[in-house]
Image (cartoon, rainbow, N blue to C red):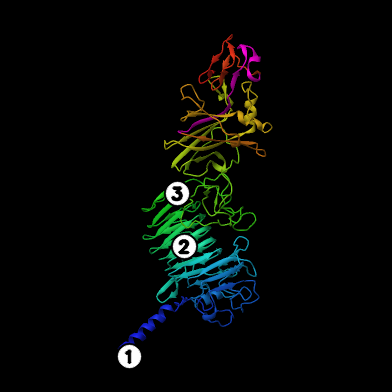
Amino acid sequence: MDIKSCSRVLIFTFFLLVSVLPLKAKICLGCPNDNGGGGSGSGGPAYSCDTMGSTIYVDISRPNNNGNGKTWASAKKYLHSALAISNECSSITTIRVARGTYKPSINGTNRDLTFFIGNNISLIGGYPEGGGNTPDHVNNPTILDAGLTEGVEAYHIMVIYDQSSNVSVKGFRFRNGFAEGSGSIEIDEGINMSRQNGAAVFIRDNANVVFENCAFYSNIALGSGGAIFAYASTVRFVNTIFSDNTAGVNGGAIYMQTNSTINVINSTFSKNLYYSGGGGAVYNTTGSTLNLHNSIVWGNTNSWNGGGERNLRQCIIQDNNTTNGGVRVNVVYQNPEFENPDDINGADDTFFTNDDGLTLCRGSIGINRGLNTAPNLPNFDINNSARISNQQVDLGPYELDFFPLYTGLPLDGEYTTAKVYSGRTGLPIANCKVLAVVEPSVPIDGNISISIKFDSLYSAYNEYTKFVARSYDLNNTSGDDFNGRITLNFHNSDFLEFNSDPYSVNNLPTGDTQSNKSYLRVVKFPGSAIPPFLPGDTLPIPEIIDPVDSDITYRPPSQIWTVSFENSGELGTYFITTTNNYVFNGLGPFSKTANWLNGLKPFGILPSLNTITVESNSQCEINEMIVLKPHSQFIVE
């Protein structure tokens, strides 16, 4: 072989070796030596990347940090030690972290200390103390806390830098970051990180970072990004809470710049603040893009500012700030009715449980309101419940396992308007009281308004036809038809009052006589009535709706009846009544009671919506006057 050919072989072999060798992970140049600058730190043993494997285990309950991190039995005690190894060894792809509170130092007070991620890894919290196979962030809280010592907090809890593949962080809580220093930290040659931005996580030059089942709270940045500062990165937040984060300038929760893209799925922003700039929840600069799906932004100093594009799909937003060319699809500007936003971990002081303050109350407009096909929708919510309940995903990180329910009966004159798209949507007023529930058979895009009238003085139609003294006027303000289910609610006393009137030949069901469900009818007057919502002779002919018995339900503790039925065409005013078909099945005079089925005979006036039927094998002699009110019928078979 000549020299030229030999050279070519050597060059080819060199490039082949380079191509198969793993790329070296990043370390932080300016970070303190025991936190990402290399080495296992904190007294750990020497290690070899060739023998470390792909997973490191971390457990704060270990007696010391002397383990090699290869198993739970030899787990590292400190997370920053495991990250230091990972940042040297690109072969490591996963770090599993047991429950506990982790700080970016053992006893140091250097505020530049941080959890530095310079490798494409999955960082997973929520494993039990001592280790296990399955993470559970609900029962095994895993906390990243910036508090180095009493009154001394790190500027950044975590830094993620320059990863071209995937970084995922799942099942952690980030708290107490305090980015209020001066100057900057050099994280790479010529790359600096301000000590005033991104108190929880500083993210720069990353292709795909994912946070899932996380909470960011009580983080403060003197500059921008109270919780998150994202620079030239693509980041996704799923089932994530941002609450009580503060920026001195822009972006109480998140600040984005330099062509960053952030995708938010089923997450909530609440009580995030800025002081001198903008973007209570998010500030995204020109060239950056924010995409929100199935999420709630409510109770912040405002939703967002900045020149970047914002796309909103199936969200509840507190204000109508510009989207800068982005789209709005099925966006609602209505209070989501959190249980208690001032107590985000609830009375049990445990995050990600059903009493958390940012769960939705039972009448919230956010229940069953999301898009089931939203991108990257997880299988489970933030408290490990099935993500889609009752056929339609809820908004925010918590999935509730109930339909919108009535928490109290509406009062006379109460009124609301709510945006309806698909799924089972409550029409609520303040304090999560639901006036009605609607479920369109196909997705619509309309505002449904509803008014309640309760007044026994207006309980008769055409003088003799009596109604339960509680009526519901529904109107689709977009002018389109509404085809689907409607559920109305009544108190047991409403039905008892109706039954006390002599008109009620067949009584409505009550708590004691639930077998009478078959007598209940819904009378619909199409179109919207004029207050006081009493149907008059000028209205269209009413429609009789006969709900099936299984759609008439009673809840004894609250004594509330719910009546569900199918509506077609336009909406209108709905009343509850009974209707009666008087059956003549005898031989002889009309006036003889014995000639009528069950001895039930009309007397002088047949009220509207009622019927007289003379059976085909009968002989009826009309020997007394009977007045037929409008929309009543006399049928001879």
Q: Nearer the viewer, residue 351 or 552?
A: 552
Q: Specify the segment rendered in magenta.
A: 569-598
Which residue, as the protein is rendered here, is positioned at the far top?
A: 623
In x, y percent, where is residue 80?
55, 74
Q: Mark 3 highlights which residue?
A: 319
- Which quarter shows the C terminus? top right
Residue that lies at the very extreme toward the right in this rendered image: 512
Q: Amino acid at mark 3?
A: Asp
Q: Residue at x 46, y 62 (%)?
A: 225
Sooner in the amino-acid sequence: mark 1 or mark 3: 1
Q: Which mark is residue 574?
A: none
The furthest residue to the front: 617
Helix, strand or loop status at disc 1:
loop
Q: Which residue is mark 2?
A: 225
- How packed mark 3 is, by other alpha carbons closer than 10 Å (few <14, some 14-19, many 20 or more), is some
Residue neighbourhood size for the residue with mark 1, other residues' Cα within 10 Å, grouped as few (<14), some (14–19), many (≥20): few
Residues marked 2 and 1 touching at CB (< 8 Å): no
Residue at (60% x, 19% y) in the render: 583
Q: Does the magenta portion include 3?
A: no
Q: Of tags 2 and 1, which is closer to the observer?
A: 1
Residue position marked by numbered label 1 in the rendering: 1
Classify 10 Å Cα crowding around label 2: few (below 14), some (14-19), many (20 and above): many
> As shown in the figure, which amino acid type bears the numbered disc 2?
Gly
What is the distance, in whole Å, between disc 1 and disc 3 at their CAs? 76 Å
Q: Position of residue 213 (x, y in %)?
A: 54, 60
What is the x, y in percent for residue 632? 53, 20
